[in-house]
Image (spheres, coloured by chain):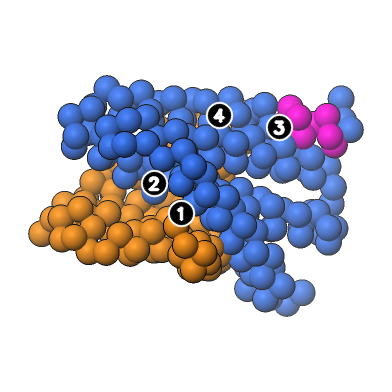
Chain colours: A blue, B orange
Amino acid sequence: MSRPVYRQPAALALVAVGGMAGTTVRALTAAALAVPPGHWPTATFTVNLVGAFILGMLLEAISSQDLLAHWALRFRLLLGTGFCGALTTYSTLAVEADLLIRSQHPVLAGTYVIASVLLGLIATAAGIWAGNLLGGRR
Amino acid sequence: MSTTRYLLIALTGGVGAITRFAVDGALRARWPGHFPWQTILINVTGSLLLGFLTGLVLFHAEPALLTAVLGTGFCGGYTTFSTASFETVRLVRDRAPLLAFANAIGTPLLSIAAAAAGLVLAHG
């Protein structure tokens, strides 16, 4: 208990396992939904919205639990920080927007970024609503 | 893509997730506060690195394995869209609409600028 959670080996292991799983799902999605340059980046768009929904649902569902409860903290590290954090990506979103701008598709780039951010917020809110039902409140 | 390639991507993705967790935890412990600038910093530095790696492949014909493993793996695992989105919603719920707006607008703008800078740096 003396060490902060981000320096505890068990916590780091949970984040690593979740992170490896999230990264693998993202890489498989990127391969399955690959598009030619100059097109809407379907794969990143999809994983980001799905991940935003899952994270909202997870954090809301466990929010009524004492965060020091072992299982709640473990779920959060494995599925939230690890899986959802690695399933979603901001760096790929940013580079895709830049490449669209560079290839003379500024409107597509702008639409992609704005749609990602706005729908990401809606997905998060929808996830929170679902997590509320799961958590058994209201 | 081969199994080895996916394995390398998964491993570096795990390292990226750990790095994000450790950096975020250390920064929040030292400088606690309401506005999630720690996540912005993580997303901006990850975007700078991915822009640079992408530029190396685009302009210098470096092997695409470099962006696949370090880019898709490390940068993808390190940066996060879901947390950024959740933090914006949290700020809205905490009745801090201006901070929520700043986070929602600032994260993409700064990340895209950082990735652009990375591309330019790689162009040389």
- For the residues marked 1 and 2, what is the alpha-carbon distance in whole angstroms? 7 Å
Question: Residue B26: in sight, yes or no?
Answer: no
Residue lying at the far left of the rendered structure: B124
In the image, what residue occupies the spot 23% across and 27% down?
A105
Residue lying at the far right of the rendered structure: A136
- For the residues marked 4 and 2, what is the alpha-carbon distance in whole angstroms? 18 Å
SS of the residue under disc 3: helix
In the image, what residue occupies the spot 67% across and 39% down?
A54
User: As shown in the figure, which amino acid type bears the numbered disc 1?
Assistant: Gly
Judging by the rendered image, the residue that carries numbered circle 4 is A121
Chain of residue at mark 2: A
- For the residues marked 3 and 4, what is the alpha-carbon distance in whole angstroms? 11 Å
Q: Which residues are magenta?
A: A128-135
Q: Quadrant of the N terminus of chain A?
A: bottom right
Residue A13 sits in which quadrant? bottom right
Left or right placement of residue A2 versus residue A37 in this view: right
Chain of residue at mark 4: A
Left or right placement of residue A128 versus residue A121 in this view: right
- Tell me, yes or no, whether the two marked residues, 3 and 4, touch with CB atoms within 8 Å: no
Judging by the rendered image, the residue that carries numbered circle 2 is A92
Judging by the rendered image, the residue that carries numbered circle 3 is A128
How many residues crowd mark 1 within 10 Å: few (<14), some (14–19), many (20+)?
many
First reached walking from the N terminus: tag 3 or tag 4: 4
Chain of residue at mark 3: A
Judging by the rendered image, the residue that carries numbered circle 1 is B76
- Examine the structure image and report whether residue A115 is included in the region drawn in magenta: no
In the image, what residue occupies the spot 83% across and 58% down?
A71
